[in-house]
Image (spheres, helix red, strand yellow):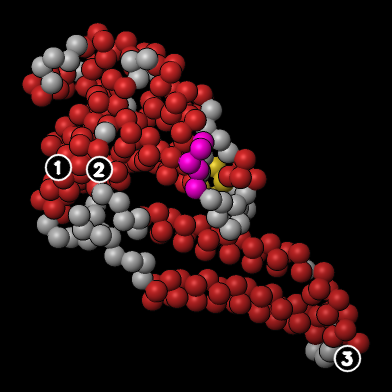
Amino acid sequence: MREAPPVSPKLTREKNRARSRAMAEAVISAFAATLKTEARKRGGFLTLPDLDELDVSFREKTAELTEVFEMAFNDAAREQEDLKWNQIKRPAFDRLMVKRFDSMLMVKDREGIPHGTFPRRFLPGFFLALNMLLGPEAMANFHARSDKIMNQVMKGIIPVDWDLLDQNQEMKDIIVDAQLAIAWQFNDTKKRTSWFIQLVNANLAPLAQGSTQVETNWEMDHISFIRLINALLHDLKVAVNDAQEWKRLKRRHPDTKRDEITAILERLS
């Protein structure tokens, strides 16, 4: 498996410098504009008492400036969080499985408020559950096949274009095969669902610095599990409901019965 390149320190410095420059220019611009306005009011001159008054006025704007700076720092933190996630050195198979629900991973807005269903700290528990559902032998097979296809598709190009890789038909087959194996594990839906939820909650990653109350208090419940499992098994659902896709699946898994898979998926919906 090719590893993604580390986040460029140069790029990080450039973005931080641009952000800092914008903040400095905003403050200086506001400061200069106020001085000019007050000077005009006083015939073009400012005395020391005038400057004392302006000092009080500027200090009153501390809350506004604090908000501007805080938003900028939150932007930087969010940017770094996204960069780190995009650079996680995981096998192609793992990345593409997470891709099924990555739009539901929490992202912080400009005010630092997280929006989404799943904090990233739930991923260790998810991967542990995935490994246990599929088993070590099957996981090794999925990893090897996925990495081989990634090498063929990307031809050494980094970073990996996950959307392009996801469109590869062989890769689609691997994903559906994995989802089929996962679905069979939920034949006893109630028991396996309870097991999955408990496993995830018992293996949440430690809280990162600056974690919000939402992230701190988050635990998987039945509702969030249903959202996760339906997103995770989406390709299998498509295959079950599409004649051509089902034929393709049956060629690889001739003993699979459509009505049995459909019943499991319905119990998970």
Q: Pointer 1 and pointer 2: residues touching (CB < 8 Å)?
A: yes
- Would residue 22 appear left or right of 191 to someone viewing this image? right
Please state which amino acid type lies under the numbered disc 2. Phe
Q: Which of marks 1 and 2 is nearer the N terminus?
A: 2
The residue that disc 2 covers is: 93
The image shows residue 139 at horizontal and vertical percentages of: 23, 38
Residue 145, disc: 1
Q: Quadrant of the N terminus?
A: bottom left
* 188 in the magenta segment: no
Q: Earlier in the sequence, mark 2 or mark 3?
A: 3
The number of discs equals 3
Please state which amino acid type lies under the numbered disc 1. Arg
The image quadrant that residue 173 belongs to is top left
Q: Main secondary structure of the magenta part?
A: loop
Residue at the limit of the structure toward the right, as seen here: 49
| Identity of the residue drawn at 46% across and 61% down | 80
Considering only vertical position in the picture, is 161 above or below 59? above
Whether residue 247 appears in this view of the structure is no
| Identity of the residue drawn at 88% across and 84% down | 52
The image shows residue 211 at horizontal and vertical percentages of: 60, 52
Range of residues picked out in magenta: 201-205
Q: Pointer 1 and pointer 3: residues touching (CB < 8 Å)?
A: no
Q: Residues within 10 Å of mark 3 (few under 14, many from 20)?
A: few
Q: Which of 58 and 236 is in front in this view?
A: 236
